[in-house]
Image (spheres, rainbow, N blue to C red):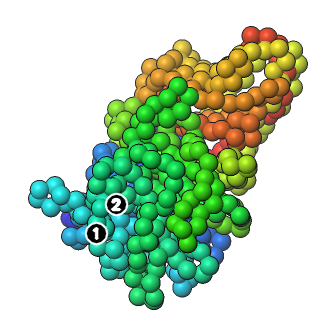
Amino acid sequence: MEKFDKKAIDLTVQEELPFKHYWHNRFHLEMPRGLINDPNGLTVLNGEYHVFFQWNPLGVVHKNKCWAHTTTKDFINYAIPQLALWPTDVHDKDGCYSGCGLVENNCVRVLYTCNSKDPNNIRTSAQRFGTLMNDGRVEKDEIVVPDNPEGYTAHFRDPNVFERDGKRYFVIGVQRKNETGTALVYEEQGEEEQWKNLGEIKTDLKDFGYMWECPGLVNFGEYDALIFSPQGLEEEEFQYQNIFQAGYIAGKFSLDSMEMMHGKFQELDKGFDFYAPQVFSNCDRNILLGWMGMPDKDDEYPTGDLGWKFSLTMPRVLELKQGHIFCQPAEELKGLRQSENAIDLEGTDLVREQLSAGSESDLNIKLGSARKVSITLKYGSESTDITFDKATQSVTIDRTGMKLGGRGKRRFKLFADKTLEVQLFVDRTAVELFLQGGEETASFFVFPSEDIKPELIVSSDAPIDVKGKIYELGSITFK
């Protein structure tokens, strides 16, 4: 049998759905086996969203990089994922790395990085187009950029196409010879898919990490945001606390000067488990999917012992306000709501609510004289705490009360004067937190050692008013 037997691999996925283990998530996209990571090839055709993502169907290690593919019209009902793109020749024999999706001649097309290494482990990175066929596979085209340009290493990957004034370009993450990260822009030349290197995007970020992965230039009307994942930033008290980061610079990008006039770099998510986001646009919405996981932290994910690792985030809609990106769960996800429980309490310092296997808690907390408010997810004798400290205007996420998986703490700044707005999605293991209307978000995993539904506990050091609703959420479906 071939190493990548599409028919056999697709059949295995189909046979192992629906999920059975209590660690498998209900409304986060994941696979029954293998390792998934970066979302790729996000695009929309005829009202249908196409979602590709990197997948190793043969194990739970970062090898055998392929692309899986699924479709959805509502982010609730999905086609059963299939193997779509896998190593087949000398160009991509060591992995089909990340890339983007686009629509051309009413077909879904992809542009991805081919990874190949010689016997001396010397890497060659090439960029290649492909077309999604009716049988679910991507038919590969010729190489359009055969290797990395002069002055840069072979860490040259993750192309993402954008359009300006009717012309096509792509931005790509690179590493300079001096081992600092940046992004290049290529311009399409003519009709034969020839592409010209226009050079680096000029920014105010100097020596900002040793590699920029997964770049994307996202337009917000008169403004732009360059989203990318820098590697090698130094950890600080309230930011850059993961081994690798994912964020953006917002401002205006000029193709004439190749300059991005921008504000400070800001992280898109302050949780433990968020990396390599990609954005696609549809009906005036910029929709983000991210990888819920973290490179080089494989030991923090015990599902690997059961044959699978990682998830994608829920789809988020992005809005740029005064140079800051706000993230909100896509409106379609309200379709997961099955029942609701209203909360309306005044002058309390303790709220306890039993959650279902999948839940959404939307809470408006009037702080009054309270200086600290904690939101606890309690799994029997285990717990994860989310604490807002008004004295420091900061949030701490503390997983040290869990027995399995990644632990530790994350701290980040958040301004809340009179009211703390909380939207908390709790899946079987994946948790996504949205604060102050999406001003800050945090994604992370918890792995309860028992099959137990969590209890939500809100506590404070002085009386608070708590109003809102808690929803029981259903599952996404695969058909």
Mark 2 or mark 1: whose residue is earlier in sequence: 1
How far is mark 2 from mark 1, CA to CA? 8 Å
- Snapshot quadrant of residue 14: bottom left
Measuring 34% from the left and 74% from the top, which residue is drawn there?
145
- Snapshot quadrant of residue 338: top right
The relative height of residue 308 versus residue 191 in the rendered view (above or below) is above
The quadrant of the image that shows the C terminus is bottom right
Residue behind mark 2: 156
Q: Residues within 10 Å of mark 2 (few under 14, many from 20)?
A: many
Measuring 74% from the left and 36% from the top, which residue is drawn there?
436
Percent x, y of residue 438 = 70, 42
- Secondary structure found at label 1: loop
Residue behind mark 1: 147
The quadrant of the image that shows the N terminus is bottom left
- Residue 206 shows up from this direction: yes
Tell me the kind of residue under disc 2: Phe
The relative height of residue 374 versus residue 437 in the rendered view (above or below) is above
Q: Are marks 2 and 1 in contact (CB under 8 Å)?
A: yes
Q: Is residue 205 left or right of residue 454?
A: left
Quick one: 165 or 107, which is closer to the camera?
A: 165
Measuring 62% from the left and 48% from the top, which residue is drawn there?
263
Quick one: 408 or 2, which is closer to the camera?
A: 408
- Residue 58 shows up from this direction: no
Specify the label residue 332 is tagged with. none
Percent x, y of residue 427 = 59, 37
Percent x, y of residue 101 = 50, 69
Q: Residue furthest left?
A: 119
